[in-house]
Image: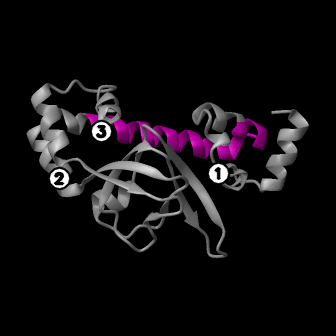
Amino acid sequence: MPDRILSNFALHIALAPDEQGQVLALLQRKTIAKRTFLLRPGETERYIYFVNQGCLRMFHTDKDGLEHNLCFFPENWWACDIVSFFKAKAATNTIQALEDSQLYYFSLPDLEQLFVKVPKLERFFRILTQNGFDMFQRRVTSNLSKTAEQRYLEFRRHYPGLEQRISQKHIASYLGITAAFLSMMRKAKDI
């Protein structure tokens, strides 16, 4: 039952029962296994995903083959490479499942159709994009001006409970430090 996604929409817009029906009619669903790739560099993002259950990550792989986690998408989060999705450009990032996950998703043509049929959905996705950009700016500023410990505490506030679900190496990559340093920092501070 898509209760979680309807509740997510209700955070920013009120959908009438007939509008909910139109949304649910175009909503697709899939279950994926841990480590499944939803997007790889060079591919074009075809879907915007809502994480109903599980957790995804978006990461960039540098020229030396090192992975840098950019964002995590636990339950009740939307996931996609936004530039690739809306501009039909080749992605530079990868999206992968960190846990077995249940996803709802829309294709761009279906989403564009919904924007016409249910105009308030355009407002919802505008707010979602604005919030995502705000998060991105705060993360860049944090990486430039805060200590590893401060960034770790922000991670814990931003993603409550996620550190018990995903590996330390993924958290360290997100923070821009090594897993060994994260472990030492946590022990020293008894975090």
**What amino acid type should be assigned to the residue bearing mark 2?**
Asp
Q: Residues within 10 Å of mark 2 (few under 14, many from 20)?
A: some
Instruction: Tell me the residue that label 3 is attached to.
Output: 126
Asked if residue 185 lies left or right of residue 57, the reply is right
Asked if the residues shown at circle 2 and circle 3 are in contact, with their CB atoms under 8 angstroms apart, the answer is: no
Horizontal and vertical percent position of residue 78: 39, 44
**Sooner in the amino-acid sequence: mark 2 or mark 3:** 2
The circle drawn on residue 110 is 2
**Sooner in the amino-acid sequence: mark 1 or mark 3:** 3
- Tell me which secondary structure the magenta stretch mostly adopts: helix
For image coordinates 33% across by 34% down, the residue present is 127
| Helix, strand or loop for disc 3 | helix
CA distance for labels 1 and 3? 26 Å
Magenta-drawn segment: 124-152
For image coordinates 38% across by 38% down, the residue present is 130
Instruction: Tell me the residue that label 1 is attached to.
Output: 174
| Helix, strand or loop for disc 2 | helix
The mark lying in front, picked from 1 and 2, is 2
The reply to whether residue 119 is in sight is no
